[in-house]
Image: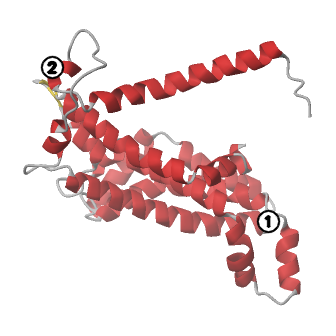
């Protein structure tokens, strides 16, 4: 098939794509590269491309009494738990909203996602008072509930859109063959939702993994996450750029690696449903 796209349009698209890639990748590449530089090379007036790599910033982060391991464990725990609960509940609620015959269900779906649009400042004070009353401050449970407040509506809305794209004929054929509603959901609908599940899980995990506001408010000495550790490097006496760049690399790396591993499902998921 002949490509009928005019040459100037293809050149413009290539230039735009190259500009977007540079805009996205250059800061990340600079951060990763600088995290392996010694302090004098990071703060040098002239950017140094060639230098002797060092792991001193990473070694400093994971050694001593205030090691980063506890922050990594806390981030993985609360982000993983909130993601798992959001995907499970969001999947079941999204399936129900997609298949139920209810007048005005589109308004109900919009109301659910509208709760996700509320500014954090509007919900953080009521949640703080509630958590203090229930003794949930500085607990994993409190942070997971806080993250669910914005991850669950997003998961429900996204999974509803994915199930809307699934033809009901497949489920009706299975029910004619004698399958129950649960068997149809578990053996027919859910396996076809892998792109949607992967997309929802990744986005929910990223939201919780990168959160600073909720962690700053609800976490304590026992539950502080990686963004809190990064903020502690910004002091009145100065900024520890080496450690800060190393933490930034640690925060970005798992998401980048995980995204590359599941990019096939992620791309397919982002081109379906409500994100299209």
Q: Identify the residue at horizontal 75%, vertical 79% (top origin).
A: 184
For this view, does 148 lie left or right of residue 127? Answer: right
Q: Name the residue that disc number 2 marks.
A: 40
The foreground one among 135 and 269 is: 269
Residue 56 lies, with reference to residue 96, above or below; the image says above
Among numbered discs 2 and 1, the one appearing first in the sequence? 2
Q: Which residue is mark 1?
A: 102
The residue mark sitting in front, 2 or 1, is: 2
> Which residue is situated farthest in the top direction here?
45
Q: In the image, what residue occupies the spot 68% across and 44% down?
A: 275
Residue that appears at 59% across and 49% down: 263
The image quadrant of residue 241 is top left
Residue 141 placed where, x, y %? 33, 65
Q: Which quarter of the rendered picture does the N terminus lie within?
A: top right
Distance from the alpha carbon under mark 2 to that under mark 1: 65 Å
Front residue of 249 and 51: 51
């Amino acid at each position: 098939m002949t490509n009928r796209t005019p040459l100037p349009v293809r050149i413009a698209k290539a230039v735009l794509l190259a500009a977007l890639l540079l805009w996205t990748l250059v800061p990340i590449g600079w951060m990763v590269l600088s995290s392996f530089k010694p302090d004098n090379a990071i703060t040098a007036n002239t950017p140094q491309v060639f230098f002797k790599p060092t792991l001193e910033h990473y070694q400093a982060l994971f050694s001593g009494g205030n090691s980063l391991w506890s922050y990594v464990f806390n981030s993985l725990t609360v982000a993983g738990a909130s993601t798992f609960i959001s995907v499970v509940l969001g999947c079941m609620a999204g399936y129900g909203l997609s298949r139920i015959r209810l007048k005005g269900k589109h308004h109900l779906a919009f109301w659910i996602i509208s709760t996700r649009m509320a500014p954090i400042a509007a919900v953080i004070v009521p949640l703080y008072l509630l958590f203090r009353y229930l003794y949930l401050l500085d607990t994993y449970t409190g942070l997971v509930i806080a993250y669910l407040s914005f991850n669950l509506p997003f998961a429900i809305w996204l999974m509803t859109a994915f199930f809307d794209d699934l033809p009901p004929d497949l489920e009706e054929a299975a029910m004619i063959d004698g399958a129950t509603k649960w068997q149809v959901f578990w053996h027919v609908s859910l396996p076809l939702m892998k792109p949607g599940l992967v997309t929802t899980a990744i986005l929910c995990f990223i939201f919780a993994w990168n959160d600073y506001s909720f962690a700053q408010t609800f976490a304590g000495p026992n539950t502080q996450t990686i963004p809190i550790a990064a903020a502690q490097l910004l002091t009145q006496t100065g900024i520890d750029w080496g450690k800060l760049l190393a933490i930034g690399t640690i925060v970005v790396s798992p998401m980048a690696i995980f995204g590359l591993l599941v990019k096939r499902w992620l791309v397919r998921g982002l081109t379906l449903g409500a994100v299209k």
